[in-house]
Image: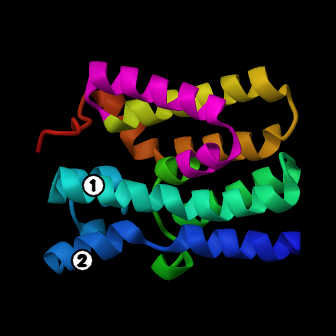
């Protein structure tokens, strides 16, 4: 299949606003007007409860995992595959269905890692879990795990395919700029506390 067709499919898949859909079906309200305003799993979890947050996270993971695992069959481990992963993450962050606004991309990033290399996924999840168990703050866990993504990628792949990874991590940090400011001020909300 054509690489550019895959890019489009991955972007559209990533654009599906599952947090918005699930929260609306649950409450009839717009998740973007609740809590942090972020249409993602963490905000759904805080505002609607653990079950709905987990469902959102799984669906957000799947919208990168599905196109990337299919693309892996055609392109193998390659620049093409990593850019298809990037397209899915961009869809989540800048959804065509939400007027090019969206979530912070962490769950969708995980979906791509899951499809590409289980070793990098293991590092990412391990770092995330350790930090969240200590801090109870989703944003600092996401940011720390995202940085580990660069380090583990360099370990396993050297500088091959690094550009899409650097773009994804940079965008995650940009999307978390409000969280970073609240972390500096000591005002960031803990995951399981209103």
Front residue of 175 and 129 = 129
Picture quadrant of residue 170: top right
User: Which residue is at 23% across, 39% downward?
Assistant: 191
User: Which residue is at 77% across, 71% downward?
Assistant: 6
User: Which residue is at 33% across, 27% downward?
Assistant: 132
Position in image of residue 116 (x %, y %): 70, 45
Q: Main secondary structure of the magenta part?
A: helix
Position in image of residue 55 (x %, y %): 31, 59
Q: In the rendered view, does 93 fall on the left or right side of 46?
A: right
Front residue of 100 and 185 = 100
Q: For the image shown, how many numbered marks are present on the structure?
A: 2
How far apart in space, not on screen, are marks 2 and 1 (Cα)? 13 Å
Q: Which residues are magenta?
A: 110-137
Tell whether position 84 is magenta: no
User: Which residue is at 88% across, 74% downward?
Assistant: 2
Position in image of residue 51 (x %, y %): 21, 55
Position in image of residue 49 (x %, y %): 16, 54
Tell whether position 112 is magenta: yes
Question: Which circle's residue, 2 or 1, is located before the other in the chain?
Answer: 2
Q: Secondary structure at mark 1?
A: helix
């Amino acid at each position: 299949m054509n690489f550019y067709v895959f890019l489009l499919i991955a972007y559209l898949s990533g654009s599906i606003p599952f947090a918005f859909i699930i929260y609306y079906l649950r409450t009839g309200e717009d998740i973007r007007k609740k809590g942090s305003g972020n249409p993602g799993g963490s905000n759904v979890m805080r505002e609607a409860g653990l079950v709905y947050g987990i469902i959102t996270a799984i669906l957000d993971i799947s919208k990168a995992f599905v196109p990337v695992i299919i693309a892996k069959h055609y392109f193998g481990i390659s620049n093409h595959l990593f850019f298809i992963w990037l397209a899915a993450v961009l869809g989540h962050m800048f959804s065509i269905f939400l007027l090019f606004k969206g979530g912070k991309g962490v769950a969708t990033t995980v979906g791509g890692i899951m499809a590409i290399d289980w070793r990098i996924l293991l590092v990412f999840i391990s770092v995330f879990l350790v930090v969240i168990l200590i801090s109870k703050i989703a944003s600092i866990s996401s940011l720390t795990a995202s940085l580990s993504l660069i380090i583990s990628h360099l370990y396993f792949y050297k500088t091959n395919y690094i550009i899409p990874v650097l773009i994804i991590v940079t965008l995650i940090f940009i999307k978390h700029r409000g969280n970073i400011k609240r972390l500096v001020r000591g005002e960031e909300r803990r995951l399981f506390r209103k």
